[in-house]
């Protein structure tokens, strides 16, 4: 049975049907195009190329030649890593795995002709398409801010020059100045990320500018690992950090990048640095391809990571509606392995095993004070559901926290090798 792509929205289909596709008659090799070269896209490209042993033609479209990971970028801000250590190239994917790496922007997807077009004017035909575009920002979600203000009030939620800019701004703060973060509403990339960033900024200020203050304007009533972060802030940075939640004006705010002012429920604060993290949605190409739902993210079939809009497209990572799974690099890497297996099975007839997913998010609060949260997941008909989980506990001893941090270093080395070879 083959489903019409136009009627795919809201449907659920058997795994066997999903894997029934065969290479086109007369075609030398089936073609897979992957849009986005992050934790989802790079992993999927490598696994399809590696496991198909050349039987599938793989093209990876990614505009940047060096990919800077959002995960661990906070540690660069905090001075625990240098910038080069979070940057990775695509050379091995091309040389060792035969992947056609195209450094260009994907600007259109024609689902009828099954082609992806790029800003450079090229068109790439596919039999299966994988879309892993990460996130974009919801326009107008922070009153007074738009992307044109990102140099005065950086978001630094896409790693690279924005990360360098925010670090430089923090280090250049006047003595006793104010760092303000506008935290994002749910759902967003890396739920513990804003609060790890606060910890890293506090670490820098404690050493360089100990009378400085940190202000968090947060529209959420609670946040990931909240008890762990608040315990750590009290221990390492007492009196430095103030969080304003929705009960105290955290949902009624605006910013003025020209005057460096933040209006919180009618009270205006002049700040030295303002890190604005807006509300988020799937990367723009997903919307252009017609893969997003009402909330701006992409609904997927939990067992296969296929788009519910088109059975020949898989969507990965931060762009997806992934049920209980958070939006993280670990999650995207996990999604990619499932999708790669499904694509390879559909195009070559190889075996596809039942999907299993996992995620862990590590955060650093201060030197050797690492905490984590994670879980394993399984697909249901409706969602990717949590099976079991774990989280660091308040009051843990220093040796355990140091081991947790060291574990995160091993994970980073492992996942980036898994992505880039």
Image: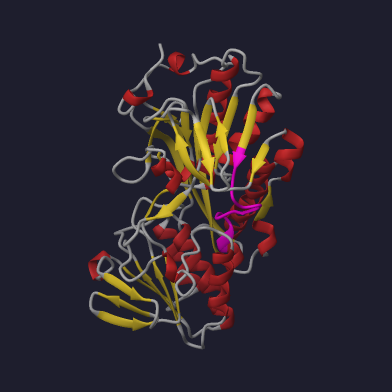
Q: Which of 326 and 139 lies nearest the eye of the viewer?
A: 139
The residue lying at 62 percent from left, 35 percent from top is: 59
Residue 333 at x, y percent in the picture: 56, 39
Residue 95 at x, y percent in the picture: 76, 38
**Residue 242 versus residue 403 in the image, above or below:** below
The residue lying at 63 percent from left, 31 percent from top is: 58
**Residue 379 versus residue 23 in the image, above or below:** below
**Residue 82 versus residue 255 in the image, above or below:** above
- Magenta span: 60-74
Q: Which of 94 and 19 lies nearest the eye of the viewer?
A: 94
Residue 98 at x, y percent in the picture: 72, 33
Quarter holding the N terminus is: top left
Query: Is residue 73 shown to the viewer in this render?
Result: yes
Q: Tell whether 297 sits left or right of 198.
A: left
Residue 100 appears in which quarter of the rendering? top right
**How are the residues colored?**
secondary structure
Residue 86 appears in which quarter of the rendering? bottom right
């Amino acid at each position: 049975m083959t489903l019409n792509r136009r009627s795919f929205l809201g449907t659920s289909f058997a795994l066997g049907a999903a894997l029934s596709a065969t290479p086109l008659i007369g075609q030398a090799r089936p073609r897979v195009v992957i849009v986005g070269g992050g934790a989802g896209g790079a992993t999927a490209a490598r696994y399809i190329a590696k496991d198909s042993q050349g039987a599938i033609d793989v093209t990876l479209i990614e505009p940047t030649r060096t990919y800077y990971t959002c995960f661990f970028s906070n540690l660069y801000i905090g001075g625990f890593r240098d910038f080069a250590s979070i940057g990775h190239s695509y050379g091995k994917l091309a040389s060792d795995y035969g992947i056609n790496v195209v450094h260009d922007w994907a600007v259109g997807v024609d689902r009828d002709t099954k082609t992806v077009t790029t800003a450079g004017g090229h068109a790439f035909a596919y039999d299966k398409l994988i879309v892993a575009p990460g996130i974009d920002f919801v326009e107008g979600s922070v009153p007074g801010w738009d992307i044109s203000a990102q140099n005065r009030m950086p978001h630094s939620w896409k790693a690279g020059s924005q990360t360098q800019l925010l670090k430089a701004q923090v280090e250049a703060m006047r003595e006793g100045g104010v760092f303000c973060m506008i935290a994002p509403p749910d759902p967003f990339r890396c739920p513990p990320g804003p609060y790890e960033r606060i910890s890293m900024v506090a670490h820098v200020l404690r050493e360089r500018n100990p009378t400085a203050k940190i202000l968090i304007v947060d529209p959420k009533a609670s946040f990931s690992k909240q008890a762990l972060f608040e315990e750590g802030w009290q221990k390492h940075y007492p009196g430095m950090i103030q969080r304003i939640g929705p009960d105290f004006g955290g949902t009624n705010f605006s910013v003025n990048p020209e005057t460096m002012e933040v209006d919180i429920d009618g009270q205006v604060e002049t700040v030295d640095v303002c890190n604005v993290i807006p509300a988020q949605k799937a990367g723009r190409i997903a919307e252009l391809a017609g893969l997003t739902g009402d909330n701006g993210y992409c609904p997927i079939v939990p067992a296969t990571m296929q788009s519910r809009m088109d059975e020949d497209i898989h969507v990965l990572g931060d762009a997806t509606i992934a049920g209980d799974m958070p939006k993280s690099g670990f999650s995207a890497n996990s999604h990619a392995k499932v999708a790669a297996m499904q694509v390879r099975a559909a195009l070559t007839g190889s075996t596809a095993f039942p999907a299993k997913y996992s995620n862990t998010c590590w955060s650093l609060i201060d030197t050797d004070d690492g905490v984590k949260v994670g879980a394993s997941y399984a697909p249901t008909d409706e969602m990717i559901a949590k099976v079991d989980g774990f989280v660091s506990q308040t009051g843990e001893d220093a040796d355990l926290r140091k081991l947790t941090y060291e574990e995160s270093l091993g994970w980073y080395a492992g996942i980036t090798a898994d992505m880039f070879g």
